[in-house]
Amino acid sequence: MREFTVSTPTATLVMTPASVSTSHDGGFGVRMTFARDEEIFAQEEEADLIYKVVSGAVRTTCLMADGRRQIGSFYFAGDVFGVEAGEFHRFSAEALCDLVVLVMKRSLVERDEALRTEVWRATAQELARAQEHLLLLGRKTACEKVASFIIDLARRQGGEKVFLPMCRQDMADYLGLTIETVSRMMTQLQAERAIALDDARRVRIQGPALERMASA
Amino acid sequence: MREFTVSTPTATLVMTPASVSTSHDGGFGVRMTFARDEEIFAQEEEADLIYKVVSGAVRTTCLMADGRRQIGSFYFAGDVFGVEAGEFHRFSAEALCDLVVLVMKRSLVERDEALRTEVWRATAQELARAQEHLLLLGRKTACEKVASFIIDLARRQGGEKVFLPMCRQDMADYLGLTIETVSRMMTQLQAERAIALDDARRVRIQGPALERMASA
DNA sequence: CGACATATTGAGTACATTCAAAGTCTGTGG
DNA sequence: CCACAGACTTTGAATGTACTCAATATGTCG
């Protein structure tokens, strides 16, 4: 169906003394960088590390045997990801674009009071996001899904101008749609003057029309 | 669209000395009971309590302005629910059937080491469930949704015989379908000898056929 | 038994999909 | 600077899965 560059995280892991920081920024330890589409961890892989985005963006995806794909979430600067209830990752994580993260051993996080609190907050926040996502997937129309998605990104980026760091396929796999449908809805939102497109990835929200179409 | 009996929790809150237990069972404090379809907490209500099911079952639901409904999760004996990242509940919670829960103040949980750990584990587990639910809603067919749902319940109940404590409307709102489609899929699964129905709520899983249809 | 809620079945429709083609953007090399 | 290749996006036409509306069946409780 689609292909992914499967390169090992270690291939780009920077472990020079200069790249290792031991405190600040929540106490997360090692800095790592990934190129666009590189895998950070794989589905079914052991989950002994916890990550925090410094810059760039991440998607987590679940791939079914026949190639169907669901994106669980997108993560941006400041977001924590990779937290699991069990021993293994249930989704894989990939860099949406060039990425810098801080990485910490799960066992260390569990021992440190402040880190544990931070990770707990992040987990609860992620659950809230997932629940919002459930409503979107289960009960919203294609148009509402796309509108909600743009509004969500706008909130996270804090402005009327929204940059979409992901391709249409990623949007589709997040929204439970096809690329064609996403594209059609973008066109429709433009026609209805809810958004304007500078190019495929640069959206401007035009007044309150989009909010109305999202049925938040 | 549909109606709910909106009665206050306090109406059935048992606060006699006999019903108050202070420890055991994870340290959750006060015992409360709810009748079928009673509301435990409401969407947008302040989230200052955390709950644990003793017996019975719970559904959490999000209601849109136009009546569309999404069920976030079902909770059974031993499950913790009502945990929020923010100050308010984003879903409401209702008793699926006669229900007994243990209730504890959120502020107390946050102060107690053992409780905090238990609640954290429950939150991470709930996130994992929600992610599985995302895949189901976003990428599975109606038939796969119903098959997966029955298998999930079977795992939680631990056996070939599955009891569905919820009505078809609740199943539909969990699976992002209509009652008619759920009903048709139940009939289809029967026709294909994946399940047998003793009555609408008593399902027997017939060998490995159902697993195959779930595309887990 | 009759009344009401819940569940199933049937027929026609609609929304999103599939398959196909055309258009746009980006980067590379001449 | 322009031409070309490849990836991504948009548009078009036909199809199909799940939905809506309607009727019937089953179950439960007075």
Image: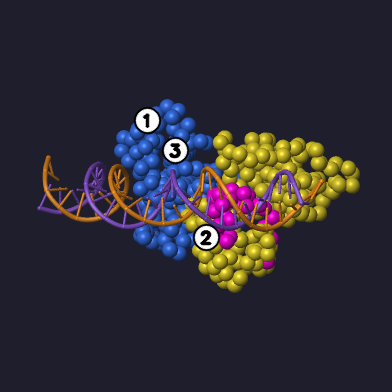
Chain colours: A blue, B yellow, C purple, D orange
Q: Residue furthest top?
A: A207
> Could you tell me which residue is drawn at 45 percent across and 64 percent down?
A65
The magenta-colored residue range is: B161-187
Viewer-closest of B14 and A82:
B14
Instruction: Tell which subunit mark 3 falls on.
Output: A
Q: Residue furthest right?
A: B17
> Could you tell me which residue is drawn at 65 percent across and 64 percent down?
B197
Q: Residue furthest bottom?
A: B207
Dot 3 or dot 1: first in sequence order is 3
Q: Is residue A152 left or right of residue A36?
A: right
- Residue bearing mark 2: B144
- Residue bearing mark 1: A193
- Residue bearing mark 3: A147
At label 3, counting other C-alpha atoms closer than 10 Å, the crowd grade (few under 14, some 14-19, many 20 or more) is many
Label 3: state its secondary structure: helix
Q: Marks 2 and 3: same chain?
A: no
